């Protein structure tokens, strides 16, 4: 299965589009101990999972914080991974979260403006407008061409 990317809500044929990622995460998503979730927490929030409901942040004190204290980007990426039947609007994600999109190989997102300065690994598994991309730079090149037309 691929990460399906849509540019508008109307392109997604399902009815479950989530625009309030914070509230959805707080109510519906747990912190699982997977390598990808560990990577996301470390890269964006400099944190690691403590339990399904808590994480250890970047402070020197080992105090467990409630998952609701995570950044919007972290919450959104974990939502995408854990709730593949929904489509998540990533408009509010920062560049640090957008840089991780190629590492997600399952789920559905609405990415209105997928033009980013990217210098990471090219490997991805993205489906966009019926085409599957294994190289993120090829995806970005096609988006750039689409924007010029």
Image (cartoon, rainbow, N blue to C red):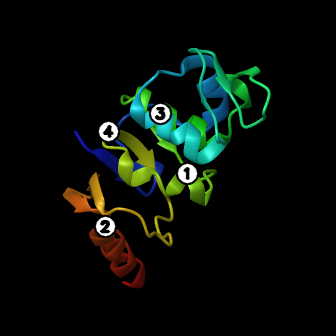
**Residue 25: x, y in percent?**
60, 26
Q: What residue is rendered at 37% in x and 48% in y?
A: 103
Q: CA distance from mark 2 to mark 1?
A: 17 Å
| Quadrant holding the C terminus | bottom left
- For this orientation, the residue located farthest to the bottom is 148
| Quadrant holding the N terminus | top left
For the residue pair 10 and 118, the one nearer the viewer reads as: 118
**Residue 77: x, y in percent?**
50, 40
Q: Which residue is mark 3?
A: 37
- Which mark is nearer the camera, 3 or 4? 3
- The answer to which of marks 3 and 4 sits earlier in the sequence is 3
Q: Which residue is mark 2?
A: 139
**Quarter of the rendering containing residue 21:** top right
**Quarter of the rendering containing residue 71:** top right
- Which mark is nearer the camera, 4 or 1? 1
**Residue 113: x, y in percent?**
50, 65
Q: Which mark is residue 124?
A: none
Is the C-beta separation of discs 3 and 4 under 8 Å? no
Is the C-beta separation of discs 4 and 1 under 8 Å? no
For the residue pair 59 and 102, the one nearer the viewer reads as: 59
- The answer to which of marks 2 and 4 sits earlier in the sequence is 4
- The answer to which of marks 2 and 1 sits earlier in the sequence is 1
**Quarter of the rendering containing residue 68:** top right
Q: CA distance from mark 4 to mark 1?
A: 16 Å
Is the C-beta separation of discs 2 and 4 under 8 Å? no
Q: Which residue is mark 4?
A: 106
**Residue 111: x, y in percent?**
47, 55
- The answer to which of marks 3 and 1 sits earlier in the sequence is 3
Is the C-beta separation of discs 2 and 3 under 8 Å? no
Helix, strand or loop under label 4? loop
Q: Which residue is mark 1?
A: 97
């Amino acid at each position: 299965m691929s990460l399906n990317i849509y540019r508008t809500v109307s392109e997604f044929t399902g009815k479950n589009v989530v625009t309030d990622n914070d509230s959805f995460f707080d109510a519906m998503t747990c912190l699982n101990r997977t390598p990808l979730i560990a990577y996301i927490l470390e890269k964006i929030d400099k944190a690691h999972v403590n339990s399904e409901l808590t994480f250890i942040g970047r402070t020197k004190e080992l105090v467990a914080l409630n998952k609701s204290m995570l950044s919007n980007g972290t919450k959104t990426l974990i939502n995408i991974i854990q709730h593949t039947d929904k489509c998540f609007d990533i408009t509010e994600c920062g560049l640090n979260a957008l840089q991780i999109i190629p590492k997600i190989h399952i789920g559905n997102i609405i990415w209105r403006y997928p033009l980013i300065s990217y210098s990471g690994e090219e490997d991805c598994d993205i489906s966009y407008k019926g085409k599957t991309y294994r190289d993120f730079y090829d995806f970005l090149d096609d988006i750039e061409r689409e924007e010029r037309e």
